[in-house]
Image: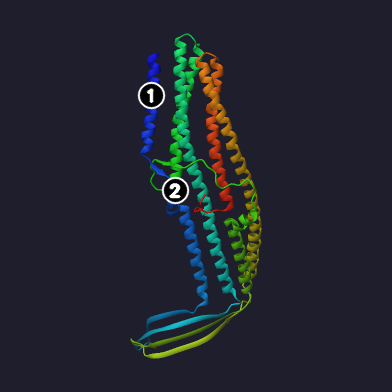
Amino acid sequence: MFRKVGRLAFASFLSLSIFIIGAGAQDVLTWQDCIKEAQKNHPDLISAEEGVKQSEAAKKITASTLFPQVNSNVGAATAKTTSDTSTKTTDTYTYGVTATQLLFDAAKTANDVKAASENIQAARHSYRFTSSFVRFRLRTAFINLLKAQELLNITEQIKKIRRDNLILIALRYESGLEHKGALLTAEANVAQAEFEVTQAKRALEVAQKELTKEMGRIQFAPMRVEGAFEVNDTSSEKPDFKDFVEKNPSLGRSVARRNAASFGVKAAQANFFPTLSAQAGANKTSSRWLPENDQWNAALSLSFPLFEGWLKSAELAGARSVFNQARADERSTKDGVVLALEQAWAALQDAAENVDVQKKFLTASEERSKIAESQYSLGMIQFDNWTIIEDDLVRAKKAFLDAQAGAMLAEAEWIQAKGEVLEYAQ
């Protein structure tokens, strides 16, 4: 039995040493390090940035109609005519330039350009919304890894406590001062503690891979994060949510889409008016190359829709429906933002206060554990009472860690509800 106890103590020391050595070889990242990597590498941010560029290009495409459309042409043709008596071949060569300028379209193109400008704003707000969501996921992954690291430390400590308890109980059992049930319970506690260490190591690897993904890294490598379980972005006084609502990127995107839809209605209404364009061209043509004969032309073109199978009416009805939908979406988004702010702020206050409560429980459990261990070693309390106190200490350690991580996650949700982007300081 004494050899078994010695092996248990040595194994505990060896496992802790291996963990410390392995941890030292890993890449250590701060929160700011994670932000910098995500800014450069996260695919969602890259995709959102490309969305802004596409919207900007779409505006340029739409606005191009307001400028002269100039085209050049070069042509060569051969015509063959056959009669009963002869065959005649005629060659024709030509080159020239033509230009078209839109003069009037009832401001349809101008409204299309304004709608495109609003779509750019919507895309920029979408980028901010994506950045806010990426920040939340990155922060969550960072907290999860920080918690997993601390949980592994706690489970290692618990395993050491369980082994030390087993050593003490084994000595008392060998001396006839403790019953076998106590010894078997202590051995089961050690087995449970060893399982929880193994479980914590697996959870640590999962958390590392989660953070790898949210930073946008392609290759996985073991890592550690460095940080404190602190909540900074909180206040006991309830803030005014009005400014947060107006600056929220999801609401800004909805407003921009509603504005774009309103210009879309005006553009659809312009379809019922005539379109006036001017054309001009200059060409050279002859039967040989280089052409020598000059040609030029100038014209005005007026186009007025008479009947297109109710196409214009359907387009206008569709544009109005899009506007009504965008207006309803804006209202729904605003209501959702207000509710999310209320919920996130309340959850943050609850989580922050819970940390203080769980800290008091942990302090009490640690003090009770010290007293109970001394009392048990002197035979002043029974094993059953002592093990209850030790179990309470284990639960208090885990509950305090859960409360700390929960408060940090609640802070991350509050920051996201405010619409803060990845670069937000906290």
* Residue 309 in sight: no
* Quadrant of the image containing the N terminus: top left
Tell me which label, 1 or 2, sits earlier in the chain.
Answer: 1
With respect to residue 63, does 207 lie above or below? above
State the separation of the CA atoms marked 1 and 2.
36 Å
With respect to residue 181, does 403 lie above or below? below
Tell me the element at label 2. helix
Instruction: Identify which residue is drawn at 38% across, 24% down.
Output: 11
Percent from the top left, x then y, of residue 342? Answer: 64, 48
With respect to residue 391, does 149 lie above or below? below
| Quarter of image, res 70 | bottom left
Q: What residue type is labelled 2?
A: Cys
Q: Name the residue under label 1.
A: 11
Percent from the top left, x then y, of residue 216? Answer: 43, 49
Residue 380's tag is none
Residue 34's tag is 2
Taking 66 as reference, is 82 left or right? Answer: left
Residue 268 versus residue 18: which sits nearer the camera?
A: 18
Instruction: Identify which residue is drawn at 40% across, 29% down.
Output: 16
Farthest residue in the bottom direction?
A: 293
Percent from the top left, x then y, of residue 96? Answer: 41, 84
**How many callouts does the rendering have?**
2
Taking 294 as reference, is 382 left or right? Answer: right
Residue 170 versus residue 82: which sits nearer the camera?
A: 170
Q: Which amino acid does label 1 sit on?
A: Ala
Tell me the element at label 1. helix
Residue 77 versus residue 40: which sits nearer the camera?
A: 40
Mark 2 crowd level (few <14, some 14–19, many ≥20, 10 Å Cα): many
Mark 1 vs 2: CB contact within 8 A? no
Farthest residue in the left direction?
A: 289
